[in-house]
Amino acid sequence: MSLAHDHANTVPRPALIMAGSLVVFSLMLAASVQLGLAPRSAVPGVERADAHVAEVESRLLSFRDQPDGSVRIVDASSGADVLTVVGEKDGGGFIRGVLRGLARDRRMRGIGAEPPFELALWQDGALSLTDRATGRTIELGSFGPDNRAAFARLLPKGATA
């Protein structure tokens, strides 16, 4: 008894053509955005500037890791302690996660932890955290009301808008 061994292509030709067409279409769509033929997605900071949305409140913050694993949050202008985040409770996990991403970006660019971050509340209710050293901005409202509130309490008035 002999077993036949076949190396024939088992993927139907129409499926390969459709997959190739999808790849080509995706590349063309990406190229059209790069070439300015199609509009880019809205960037919140640019949209706010175009709509003349003013900043309502802001605060420069420094985040300092402590030997016990907590994070001490300091008002960079006055040097006053704002909050110490211990563990995951009360949004501490979200704050740590955001800072981890921003710190990684700084390390890749050779920037230390000294430059402060700017936390800003805008007239339209948006809340953003900007790393002025790298220019990166995180729109905190995008992560839901509980995570937004974790940062909003760091503003002088504890903004909840």
Image (cartoon, rainbow, N blue to C red):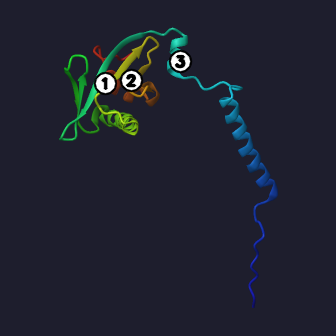
Where's the C terminus, which quadrant?
Answer: top left
* Residue 108 against residue 12 in the figure, above or below: above
* Badge number at residue 116: 1
Residue 55 at x, y percent in the picture: 41, 11
- Residue lying farthest to the right in this orientation: 14
**Residue ID at (76%, 82%):** 4
Q: In this view, does 92 lie to the left or right of 38?
A: left
Number of numbered labels in the structure image:
3
Residue 74 at x, y percent in the picture: 23, 24
Name the residue type under label 1. Pro
Q: Name the residue under label 3.
A: 46
Residue 82 at x, y percent in the picture: 22, 23
Give the mark nearer the N terminus: 2 vs 3: 3
Q: Is residue 7 left or right of residue 64?
A: right
Name the residue type under label 3. Val
* Residue 154 seen in the current view: no
Evaluate if marks 1 and 2 touch, with contact meaning CB atoms under 8 Å apart. Answer: yes
- The CA span between labels 3 and 1 is 22 Å
Q: Name the residue under label 2.
A: 132
Report which quarter residue 43 is drawn in: top right
Q: In front here: 20 or 11?
A: 20
| Helix, strand or loop status at disc 3 | helix
**Residue ID at (33%, 32%):** 95
Q: In front here: 14 or 38?
A: 38
Q: In front here: 109 or 26?
A: 109
